[in-house]
Amino acid sequence: MIVLIGFMGAGKTTVGRLLADRLGLPFLDSDLVIEQRTGRQVREIFAENGEPAFRILEHEVIVDLLDGPDAVLALGGGAPEHPGTQLRLKQADVVYLQVGYQQAMQRVAGDEYRPLLARPGLDELYQRRLDVYGAVASLIIATDGRQPEAIGADVIERLGVTGLPR
Ligand code: S3P
């Protein structure tokens, strides 16, 4: 199981799809699985049930996915803050896609499907999470100014996993 973590805009979904394709594994995205299972959008869950309810649901879905067949799994940006999720991530190859705050904001600015972007103190949240991501990562990959293909190739090389022949 290869798990991608990082702040919003780090490229977890884009790089995750590339990696899954290259490795011949299914691609999973915790936000999409939450949306499929609940039939509701992440932003609706935030608005109607609040962030704490979303975090509980997110943890349950991630545990379930980690227990399932091997895959490339992209986590929502806040997922690694959950202590229970942190424990479970010890069993996986956790790739932290590192993105600078400015670059992250350029990539996701104005996305109304990301409820946290409308919150004050986003830069403080970013700062706080840097340590969390670093602590759970098995591998840290810088992404600023790089193309997804190059990042994906870097992950494959540094994890020592074998890609499918092209
Ligand atoms: C969140 C990031 C989002 C999504 C939710 C909360 C966060 O996922 O899980 O909006 O707390 O950073 P992405 O990181 O894929 O944008």
Image (cartoon, grey):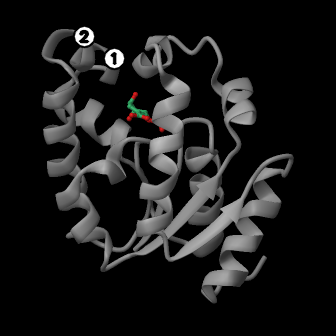
- The three-letter code of the residue at mark 2 reads Ala
Q: Quadrant of the N terminus?
A: bottom left
Image position of 4 (left or right of 149):
left
- The three-letter code of the residue at mark 1 reads Arg
Circle 2 Cα neighbour tier, 10 Å, few/some/many (<14 / 14–19 / ≥20): few
Q: Residue at 50% of width from left, 31% of height from top?
A: 124
Image position of 51 (left or right of 137):
left
Image position of 88 (left or right of 165):
left
Query: Where does label 2 land, which residue?
Result: 47
Q: Residue at 71% of width from left, 42% of height from top?
A: 100
Q: Residue at 54% of width from left, 36% of height from top?
A: 8
- On the image, the x and y values in percent for residue 109 come to 65, 17
Query: Where does label 1 land, which residue?
Result: 43
Image position of 41 (left or right of 150):
left
- On the image, the x and y values in percent for residue 9 come to 62, 36
Looking at the image, can residue 120 be seen? yes
**Label of residue 59 in the image:** none
Mark 1 and mark 2 residues within 8 Å of each other at the beta carbon: yes
Quarter of the image holding residue 46? Answer: top left
Quarter of the image holding residue 78? Answer: top left
Disc tally is 2
- On the image, the x and y values in percent for residue 38 come to 17, 29
SS under mark 2: helix
Q: Quadrant of the C terminus?
A: bottom right
